[in-house]
Amino acid sequence: MLSGILKKEDCASCRFCCSFRRTSLWETPIFTEENITAIEADNRLNSEVLNIVEKDGFKFASYDLGNDYKTQDSFEEVPCPYLGENGCTLSSEEKPWDCKIWPLRVMKKDQEPVIALTPTCPTINSLSIETVRQYVNDDLRNDILDYAKDHPYLIKKYRQDYPVI
Ligand code: SF4
Ligand code: SF4
């Protein structure tokens, strides 16, 4: 979604955001009902890793990596079950919105959804916040906020170290 300011080559040499430390398990992506249906229909994929929840009229899912760590090292990273040798193995219909908008996040701040920028993406954070804000304003802001309002379970709790853009 951010291809205008985030090149594939940068991600290929980084791949940071498809693996998770214990402290970033809250960042594992949420799969919408449409993602779940598409994954279940795809014979290539293991849908059993998804823990499905039905709440407030919505069906969604996530996976739990908590038992997959092999050491006590807080820097140990466990990959997403859908990460393959050449990157994400999911199609567009299967891929979570969380992953599509990364490194942006929609977070609830002062009771309102805001778009925030994760501080951990090295590529986006090498740009000025104004450059990112301008890109989002021009192309994405309304689409992202409308989608989040229609899927409120995707909105995360605000974190102080995430600048609002
Ligand atoms: S952290 Fe940023 S540069 Fe690295 S893979 Fe993720 S989006 Fe790409
Ligand atoms: S679903 Fe794909 S893009 Fe998202 S974390 Fe997993 S491998 Fe990465």
Image (tube, rainbow, N blue to C red):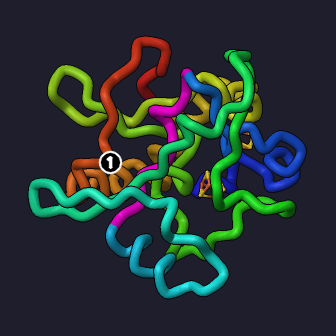
Q: Quadrant of the N terminus?
A: bottom right
* Residue 129 sits in quarter: top right
Would residue 23 be found to the left or right of residue 159 on screen? right
Question: Percent position (x, y) of residue 45?
Answer: 61, 75
Residue 91 spot, x, y in % from top left: 61, 75
Q: Is residue 114 left or right of residue 3?
A: left
Question: Is 149 or 66 nearer to us in this picture?
Answer: 66
The residues colored magenta run 23-32
Q: 51 and 117: which one is in front?
A: 51
**Image position of 165 (left or right of 81):** left
**Rendered location of residue 26, percent (x, y):** 45, 32
The residue drawn where x is 39% and y is 18% is 159
| Crowd around label 1: few <14 · some 14–19 · many ≥20 (10 Å) | many
The image quarter containing residue 31 is bottom left
- Label 1: state its secondary structure: helix
Q: Which residue is mark 1?
A: 154
User: Which quadrant is home to the C terminus?
Assistant: top left
Above/below status of 151 relative to 123: below
Relative height, residue 134 to residue 80 (above, below): above
